[in-house]
Amino acid sequence: MPTTSLDHDTKTLPSRPATPQEQTIIDEVLSLYQLKPTDKSYAHYAPTAVFHDPVSLARGLDSIKSQFNGMPKLFGSSTTEACRVLDDPSQPDALRLDLTQRYVFKTGQAKTLNSLLTLRLTNGMIEHHEEEWDHKENKTAEDGFFGRLSEWRKKADAKVVEKMVPADPNQV
């Protein structure tokens, strides 16, 4: 289920304070981006959750765990520079975050990335976690031939990572 960030400019949406329950979920998700995965980090993901970003399309909690548990293999550090909860009336069933994250590769190169995170929740559990780099929609099969190719590649990437990286954060 792709988000519709193109409906309006999400970078200009106003921010709002997080509720206490939202803040707990945000802190857990940010721990993943900060290369600190723990069992608690995944406490609010449904077993059938989906994670979609420009690199991978992971279906199921174990596959999502492998994606995030593999990040410390690539990056020496990752720091959250900014995180705003967006007040987006067009997405009432989602927690939307404007995230700026600075990644330092193990080679020493650094990259700062601004993303739109959309967390679709059902009964307090994340069912769908979408990350759109620079707030640009991820390509899917619905985008025609090249979208289908992109989606196939992302699914394959997720399966490769799932085979190589344990889902248990204690084994990372």
Image: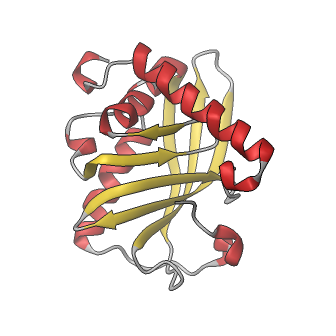
Q: Quadrant of residue 25?
A: bottom left
Q: Is residue 153 left or right of residue 92?
A: right
Which x, y percent locates residue 130?
51, 54
**Residue 50 visible in the shown view:** yes
What residue appears at the point 26 percent right and 51 percent down from the top-left corner?
46
- Residue 86 against residue 147 in the figure, above or below: below
User: Does residue 40 appear left or right of residue 136 in this picture?
Assistant: left
Image side of residue 30 versus residue 73, left or right:
left
How many discs appear?
0
Left or right position of 70 against 6: left
Of all residues shown, which one is farthest toward the bottom?
89
* Residue at 46% in and 45% down: 51
The relative height of residue 63 versus residue 87 in the rendered view (above or below) is above
Q: Quadrant of residue 145?
A: top right
Does residue 23 sit above or below 154 in this rendering?
Answer: below
Q: Tell me the residue at 38%/32% (across/down).
A: 63
From the viewer's side, name the closer residue of 12 and 56: 56
Percent x, y of residue 120: 40, 64
Q: Residue at x 70, y 42 (%)?
A: 148
65 w.r.t. 133: above or below: above
Residue 42 screen position, x and y as percent: 27, 43
Quadrant for the C terminus in the image = top left
Please provide percent x and percent y for residue 97.
49, 64
Q: Is residue 55 visible?
A: no
Color scheme of the displayed model? secondary structure
